[in-house]
Image (cartoon, rainbow, N blue to C red):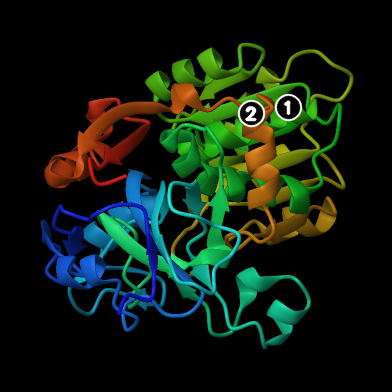
């Protein structure tokens, strides 16, 4: 006997996008399998869970890194592993215990599953959960599948929002966490290092927050051009990689213009690259802050005495918490408009080409979206 309420017959086979320790990438059948989805098997859909047909999934830099490098710090790909954690879709089936979602609801999926018992969970900072299972971080399989079973409490209703914007709520959550912890305020001068997807969404957030002036940097002129399309009042600076961090910082400071104090109060570092972090430290004013959003190598050097003598705060973040409802409001009200971020779209069956495009700096890709035509 079925333990679920289902919107319609599920007919297309479930597939996922896999990588492995040999850095291969392929698409093949994945769990939950078609038979269990059709039956609404309680073993595959536990209490509190729903089945979601994934419609859009963005490729994140971490997905590329797990594919190419096989690891990010201590998180290592040791077996066949499904990628993807930026996803939205439509609810197909619900366990009877779920009352706030019904089949047909459009949802964005928050990919972190927490224990609800440790100190970070109990104090509201659940991104630090000591038993976190973050989908797409080994060994926990990700969301790049046609169908997934997921706890209903981490499926956020998005109303009539597009599935692409629903998928982009995940990187928007990263940017919002950075905005909150860095303390960017109206009128702050802000430097954004890196014009990748996180940097560009952070730019949109700084624009909405009233930061001014804003300078965004990158090594790629095309991405900087893209940044000015998203935020025309932002100033851009193409990084000369032959310069030392201190000389690069001097060039960046000149980009801020002839205001009384040209140095930024806050630098939002979105690359995780050692030289970029050092440049940000040399750029900010006395008493300023360098806030690192990007993910970098396990160990790196920083200009310690510059931090010390200038009383510069160096701060970091790890993912996000309690951001999704706010992200949904910002997009629904048109405060943050992310439609221009998606440059390439591929069907899930063509995911290998999607990853190759996303990982190729010559492709001009900003955000690559994988779409799935499925039930719902």
With 163 as the anchor, is 361 left or right in this view?
A: left
Q: Secondary structure at mark 1?
A: helix
Q: Residue at x 26, y 74 (%)?
A: 77
Residue at 31%, 70% (x, y): give it: 141
- In the rendered view of the protein, which quadrant contains the C terminus? top left
List x then y, in percent, for residue 5.
41, 64
Horizontally, is 337 left or right of 313 in the view?
left
> Would you place residue 139 above or below residue 13 in this image?
below
> Looking at the image, is 115 positioned above or below residue 101?
below
Q: Circle 2 sits on which residue?
A: 336
Disc number placed over residue 362 in the picture, else none: none
Q: Residues within 10 Å of mark 2 (few under 14, many from 20)?
A: some
**Mark 1 against mark 2, which lies toward the viewer?**
2
Q: Could you tell me residue 268's position as x and y percent?
A: 65, 43
Instruction: Give neighbour class at mark 1: few <14, some 14-19, many 20+ (Cα, 10 Å).
Output: some
* Count of marks overlaid on the render: 2
* Residue under numbered circle 1: 208
> Percent position (x, y) of residue 230?
55, 18
- Measured Cα–Cα span from mark 1 to mark 2: 7 Å
Report helix, strand or loop for mark 2: loop
- Determine whether, in the image, residue 130 is placed left or right of residue 224: right
Q: Nearer the viewer, residue 217 or 223?
A: 223
Res. 282 in view: no
Residue extending furthest toward the front: 1
Q: Are marks 1 and 2 in contact (CB under 8 Å)?
A: yes
Question: How far across and down, in percent of the image, does residue 7 sit?
Answer: 36, 53
In the visual, does 349 lie left or right of 92? left
- Residue 222, by quadrant, is top left
Precedes in sequence: disc 1 or disc 2: 1
x 44%, y 27%: residue: 341
Front residue (pair 64, 362)? 64
């Amino acid at each position: 006997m079925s333990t679920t309420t289902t919107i319609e017959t599920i007919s297309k086979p479930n597939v996922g996008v896999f990588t492995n320790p040999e850095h291969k990438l392929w698409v093949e059948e994945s769990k939950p399998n078609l038979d269990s989805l059709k039956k609404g098997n309680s073993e595959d859909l536990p209490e509190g869970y729903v089945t979601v047909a994934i419609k859009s999934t963005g490729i994140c830099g971490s997905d590329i890194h797990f594919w190419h490098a096989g690891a990010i710090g201590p998180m290592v790909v040791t077996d066949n592993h499904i990628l993807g954690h930026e996803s939205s879709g439509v609810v197909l089936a619900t366990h009877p215990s779920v009352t706030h979602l019904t089949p047909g609801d459009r949802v964005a999926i928050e990919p972190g599953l927490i224990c609800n018992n440790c100190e970070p969970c109990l104090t509201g900072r659940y991104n630090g959960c000591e038993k976190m299972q973050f989908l797409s971080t080994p060994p926990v399989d990700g969301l790049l599948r046609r169908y997934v079973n997921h706890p209903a409490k981490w499926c956020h209703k998005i109303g009539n929002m597009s599935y692409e914007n629903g998928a982009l709520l995940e990187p928007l959550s990263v940017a919002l966490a950075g905005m909150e912890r860095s303390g960017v305020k109206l009128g702050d001068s802000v430097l954004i290092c890196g014009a990748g997807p996180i940097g560009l969404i952070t730019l949109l957030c700084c624009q909405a927050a009233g930061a001014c002036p804003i300078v965004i940097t990158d090594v790629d002129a095309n991405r900087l051009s893209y940044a000015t399309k998203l935020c025309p009042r932002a100033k851009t600076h193409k990084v000369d990689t032959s310069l030392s961090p201190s000389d690069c910082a001097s060039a960046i400071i000149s980009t801020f213009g002839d205001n009384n104090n040209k140095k930024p109060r806050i630098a939002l570092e979105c690359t995780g690259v050692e030289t970029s972090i050092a440049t940000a430290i040399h750029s900010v004013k006395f008493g300023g802050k360098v806030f690192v959003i990007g993910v970098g190598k396990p160990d790196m050097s920083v200009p310690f005495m510059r931090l010390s003598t200038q009383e510069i705060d160096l701060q970091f973040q790890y993912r996000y918490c309690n951001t999704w409802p706010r992200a949904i409001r910002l997009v629904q009200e048109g405060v943050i408009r992310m439609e221009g971020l998606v440059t390439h779209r591929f069907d899930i069956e063509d995911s290998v080409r999607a990853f190759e495009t996303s990982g190729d700096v010559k492709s001009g890709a900003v955000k690559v979206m994988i779409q799935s035509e499925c039930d719902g």
